[in-house]
Image: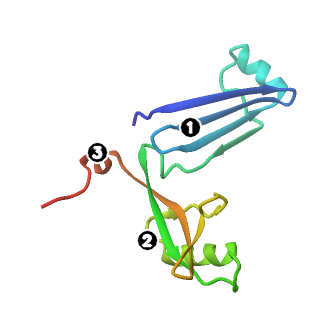
Amino acid sequence: MKINAKVTVLFDRDGLRIEVYDQDSCTQFLNLQLSPEQTCDALSRLAHTECQEAEVMNLDRVGKVREVRGLEFPYLSSVGHRNREAAIEECKRICPEGWTPMLSFNSQNTFFEVDGFQWARTSICRWVDRLEKDQGPFTW
């Protein structure tokens, strides 16, 4: 599988950190940490250099495309307060299956009022196969 990968290489006194990111899925999936000695070995072209730390994550998202949508919903809060925890719980409860909600609720326009009721807005995302995204919405 070919992906639209981006790499970040960071040097500091602790060694070398390499991060690999899939641009289409907006996902970092590989993080490598090398000690200063391991960094020197790798830069001197020593094959199969051991890593101090190696972490692979989010492989189920790699090669897919990230789809993002907005979600607005009413929630119950303490009287006169914009209760972030209440919004998080309600968002988790109503989020459609297969979607992942963004639970930061830190934007200036996150909380608003409609007809005396507290509402919140956030984004939800999911990762879909490239073909599903390219075909667009299904129509009859």
| Residue that carries the numbered disc 2 in the rendered image | 96
Query: Mark 1 or 3, which is nearer the eye?
Result: 3
Q: What SS does tag 1 mark?
A: strand
The residue sitting at 32% across, 49% down in the picture is 133
The residue sitting at 49% across, 77% down in the picture is 94
Instruction: Write down the quadrant of residue 9 in the picture.
Output: top right
In the displayed structure, 21 sits above or below 92; it is above
| Residue that carries the numbered disc 3 in the rendered image | 134
Around disc 1, counting alpha carbons within 10 Å, would you say few (fewer than 14), some (14 to 19), or many (20 or more)? some
Q: Position of residue 108 (x, y in %)?
A: 64, 58
Around disc 3, counting alpha carbons within 10 Å, would you say few (fewer than 14), some (14 to 19), or many (20 or more)? few
Q: What SS does tag 3 mark?
A: helix
| Residue that carries the numbered disc 1 in the rendered image | 21
Q: Position of residue 130 (x, y in %)?
A: 34, 45
The disc, 1 or 3, on the residue closer to the chain's N-terminal end is 1
Q: CA distance from mark 1 to mark 3?
A: 21 Å
Q: What SS does tag 2 mark?
A: loop
Q: Nearer the viewer, residue 139 or 60?
A: 139
